[in-house]
Image (cartoon, rainbow, N blue to C red):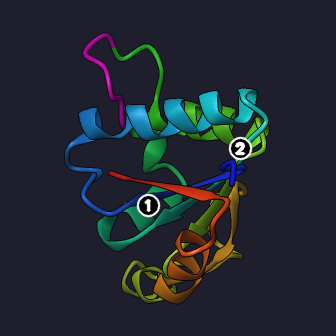
Amino acid sequence: MEKRKIVIMLLNTEPDRPWTLGAPFFQAIVATTLDLEVEMYFASRNVALFKPGVAEELFPGEDNQKSVYSFMQDAHEAGVKFYACGGAMDENDLTVDNAIPELDGAAGGAAFLGEVIEDDVATLTY
């Protein structure tokens, strides 16, 4: 069966290593241009990216021309859905109400695993 959806897990990337954060959003945007449905799941320390002001101060490239938040905005505008781990949200004192507007909701490991076992879903992890 042809893959029609991509789910991306950000687990090993970290805000403390912003150079690791450009590729996942760029590839998510590319996937939308291929008419694929794209969901990104954020776990662990990556959930901090949904705190207002955090991703705006991070730059994946040395030229500091485009922030991680700009990449997030571009991906979300392209149709990528963003979901944060509920437990990690608690750890970061984050709720859907006090997060940046691009957060689509809370979804944990069960939601992610439920997606990756589907036949028409491809998975990328970072």
Q: How many marks?
A: 2
Q: Residue furthest front?
A: 1
Between 2 and 51, the one nearer to me in the picture: 2
Residue 1 location (% of width, % of height): 69, 55
Residue 112 location (% of width, % of height): 53, 76
10 vs 61, left or right, is right
- Identify which residue is drawn at 52% across, 65% down: 41
- Identify which residue is drawn at 39% across, 71% down: 43
Cα distance in 3D space between marks 2 and 1: 15 Å
- Quick one: label 2 or label 1, which is nearer the N terminus? 1
- The answer to which image quadrant residue 24 occupies is top left
Which span is picked out in magenta? 58-63
Query: Is residue 43 shown above or below 13?
Result: below
Mark 2 and 1 residues: CB-CB less than 8 Å, in contact?
A: no
Residue 99 location (% of width, % of height): 62, 66
* Residue 43 located within the stretch drawn in magenta: no
Between 109 and 35, the one nearer to me in the picture: 35
| Front: mark 2 or 1 | 1
Instruction: Indicate the secondary structure of the residue bearing disc 1.
Output: strand
Amino acid at the residue labelled 2? His
- Identify which residue is drawn at 46% across, 82% down: 93
Magenta stretch secondary structure, dominant: loop
Q: Residue furthest left?
A: 17
Between 51 and 72, the one nearer to me in the picture: 72
> Which residue position is annotated with label 1?
9
Instruction: Indicate the secondary structure of the residue bearing disc 2.
Output: helix
- Identify which residue is drawn at 54% across, 75% down: 117
> Which residue position is annotated with label 2?
76
Between 19 and 4, the one nearer to me in the picture: 4
Amino acid at the residue labelled 1? Met
91 vs 80, left or right, is left
31 vs 20, left or right, is right
